[in-house]
Image (tube, rainbow, N blue to C red):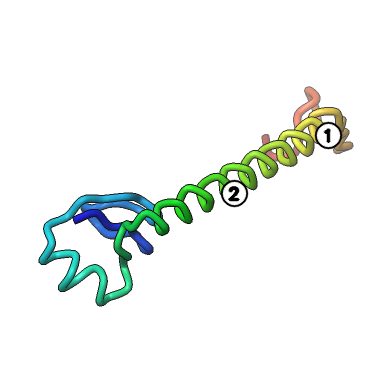
């Protein structure tokens, strides 16, 4: 029996994984507890679209993070501190 997981299930898979399980396990435990749905052709198409959208959003997040990292790399910080004998900070 093929199912699409809606929640992470220990020793089985993560959210939005397509898994094969024994019919009794799927029918009696996973589906009634809302952890999975049947993997029909329509559900598989929706899963593919969801994964495609998630990949697009993740790519946009990576691009934004890289731009921010580039801005931070261009920054130069100077911290002024008084030093003691031998150009050491107090307590060093």
Nearest the eye: 77 or 54: 54
Residue 1, quarter of the rendered image: bottom left
Residue 32, how many percent across, how many down? Answer: 25, 76
Residue 59 left/right relative to 6: right
Residue 76 left/right relative to 6: right
In the image, what residue occupies the spot 28% across and 59% down? Answer: 9
Nearest the eye: 73 or 19: 19
Residue 78 left/right relative to 24: right
Disc 1 designates what residue? 71
Extreme-bottom residue of the structure? 32
Extreme-front residue of the structure? 41
Residue 56, how many percent across, how many down? Answer: 63, 43
Disc 2 designates what residue? 53
Mark 2 near mark 1, Cβ–Cβ under 8 Å?
A: no
In the image, what residue occupies the spot 24% across and 54% down? Answer: 2
Secondary structure under the numbered disc 2 in the rendered image:
helix
Extreme-top residue of the structure? 86
Nearest the eye: 69 or 9: 9
Q: Which of marks 1 and 2 precedes in the sequence?
A: 2
Frontmost of labels 2 and 1 is: 2
Crowdedness of circle 2 by 10 Å Cα count: few (<14), some, many (20+)?
Answer: few
In the image, what residue occupies the spot 64% across and 39% down? Answer: 59
Secondary structure under the numbered disc 1 in the rendered image:
helix
In the image, what residue occupies the spot 23% across and 68% down? Answer: 30
């Amino acid at each position: 029996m093929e199912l699409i997981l809606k929640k992470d299930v220990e020793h089985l898979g993560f959210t939005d994984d397509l898994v094969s399980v024994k019919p009794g396990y799927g029918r009696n435990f996973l589906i009634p507890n809302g952890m999975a749905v049947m993997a029909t052709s329509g559900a598989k198409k929706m899963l593919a679209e969801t994964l495609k959208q998630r990949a697009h959003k993740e790519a946009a997040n990576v691009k934004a993070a890289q731009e921010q990292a580039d801005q931070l790399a261009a920054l130069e910080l100077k911290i002024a501190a008084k030093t003691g004998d031998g150009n050491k900070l107090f307590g060093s």
